[in-house]
Image (spheres, rainbow, N blue to C red):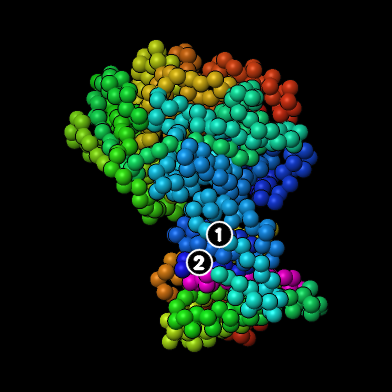
Amino acid sequence: MKCSGWGRYPQVDCEEFSISQKTNLNELITHCDSAIAFGNGRSYGDSALGSHIMKLKQRDYFLSFDHKTGLLHVQAGVLLSEIIEHYVPLGWFLKVTPGTKLITVGGAIASDVHGKNHHIEGCFSECVHEFTIMLANGEITTCDKEQNPDLFHATCGGQGLTGVILDAKIYLKKINSQFISQTTIKTKNLKETFEAFEKYKNMPYSVAWIDCLAKGSSKGKSLLMVGDFRDDCELEYKHKHQVSIPFNFPTWSLNNWSVSAFNWIYYHKVTEKISHQKVDIDSFFYPLDALGNWNRIYGKNGFTQYQFILPKETSYEGLDEILSTIAESGKGSFLAVLKLYGKANDNWLSFPMEGYSLALDFKVEPELFQLFEVLDKVVLKYGGRFYLAKDARVSKEVFEQGYPNIEKFREFRKKNHMDIKFQSLQSKRVGI
Amino acid sequence: MSYVLIVGAKSDIAKAIAREYAKHGYDLYLAARNSAELADFANDINVRTQRKVKLVELDILAYQSHQAVYDSLEEKPLGVITAVGYLGEQKKAQVNFDEAQRILDTNYTGVVSFLNIVANDFEQRKSGFIVGISSVAGERGRKSNYLYGSAKAALTAYLSGLRNRLHQAHVQVLTVKPGFVATKMTEGMDLPKKLTATPEEVASDIFSAQQKGKNSIYTKWIWKYIMLVIKLIPEWKFKGMSI
């Protein structure tokens, strides 16, 4: 059966196993090599694709919740959207959430996802009290940072390559409103954008949309959005009507002109230098989830995201060079996201480090990968690295330069026979 | 009074319905055979929604026990949803009457036995709703599943009569006719994606139709038109077709 990640690139043949509550997973794992866990299919590239994929979404039971401490115990197939739906009305929210709520808890751990508050709260693993995981020999182990630190640091961010995460206990955070007070800051160029990030770095949530086609003196112009939860006790979480993209857009519909036009409108609809809004959780954290199947906008060949992070010292210079390269290539991305990150954690393959990350979505077309190779060199020159959860193409040589703990990860996998048992297309490509 | 009783609670559709009603603030009775196997699922709903969930032991084929089971419910439900379904094996049922009888009794006789009891109670109380899950297979008999189809056809007629009878008592009766649904029952079948609903979609359709006081729905909605076309095919043509 043809399978793909959220970017719908690549599309490959996979043998699928639906794992239900009753499936004997132990038997499957002990008898099947080269398998990989698959959650809700929201990794963009090939991190959950392989010859045998284990679909775990049906293991979606909530197990317990402590209303005093906010500790929630769920099976790994539970979606973040389900947690939000049931617990926001009770005044609880995720400590860390990425830009989509349509991912499983298991996937959130395996990619050690992060969100708009990374500079304050860190990655998803920060809220993980413990998890259970089925290892290569079929054994189930409970894992936390203190008792088995190696397994914890390898699994959080380890892209499912250490085993199958079965359930997890995560801490939720208390909120007093389902609304966020948002401030939007309009900047004219990269320098102003950086200054704004620094100025608002104490705000709990921040992210910027950047016009990656802007050239010359307006290169790096952005809309920085920062915010925090309100305190108005309005917790009624309303389910919004979802609009879906019903079919693939023609591949020519996204081009230099249409993206430029979109960027112009998006930037100019904000008229004031600094403006304030009251927005709900879904609009603030998950704007794209409101548009079902939005990946179809990129046409039948799919899209890929180029996301990298640069250390803070080199961020300005590096981004300046990268934005110039992209603007000159004319390959536009209308979803270009810039963000200031906090300190790196101890997980061996977690993406974040202190600095700036840029994420760009591009529709897949032949010349694109040449541009990426040029950009790769610039990212490496400035000491940056790439995010596996978004990746579908980075080479082993390029990838491994960004991750100092990669050998530790490789050895750990080998020692525990995980290297043969758990494999994805991505793990084979980047040699992890 | 806040309980909704779901009969045949182990099916994928029933489970999705249970979550849907709990999400909207209803407590639940989940009735099934070997209902203890639903303990983890009941806990899941309770942790998600803080609603009360009680398990009820019910064998739909043990007709004699039905009254006692219903009487044992401390608080009577404000609505009952039957999601009992047994597809069976058509070919086997053609040569083995035990299989044929199992299909007919599970999908029809058992449900009638139980709903008769519910209907009497609701009629007397002059309130309540009954949702019966039938099937588009009951709209026209086809060689591939006409035993299942005929039981569902009978159920559709039964529900229609029940609706007529209970109208005076202000009891709503909703007939649900799902088309293809991706469940355990249809696992392994090659179903066309665009026409196949998830159990969650079916549950959401049922909840909104029930709340709006509707009489009969197809889910997905497109099945209304598919069945219209299928019913319009003249018999002389239909009898030679394989659909």
Pinpoint residue B3: horizontal percent, then vertical percent: 50, 66
Q: Nearer the viewer, residue A419 or B215?
A: B215
Q: Amino acid at mark 1?
A: Val
Q: Which residue is most to the right?
A: B95
Chain for numbered disc 2: B
| Mark 2 in CB contact with mark 1 (< 8 angstroms) | no
Disc 2 residue type (three-letter): Tyr
Chain of the residue that carries numbered disc 1 in the rendered image? B
- Establish if A92 lies above or below B195: above
- Which residue is rendered at x = 61% and y = 60% of the image? B12
> x, y percentage for residue A39?
58, 42
Q: Residue at x 77, y 38 (%)?
A: A30
Give neighbour class at mark 2: few <14, some 14-19, many 20+ (Cα, 10 Å).
many
Circle count: 2
Does residue B99 show up? Answer: yes
Determine the CA span between mark 2 and mark 1: 9 Å
Report the residue marked by disc 2: B3
Q: Is residue A233 left or right of residue A4?
A: left
Q: Is residue B90 magenta?
A: yes
Task: Indicate whether residue A375 is drawn in magenta.
Answer: no
Point 58% across, 46% down: residue: A63
Image height check: is A273 above or below A73?
Answer: above
Q: Which quadrant of the structure image shows residue B6? A: bottom right
Task: Please give the residue where the numbered disc 1 appears in the rendered image.
Answer: B53
What is the magenta range? B75-91
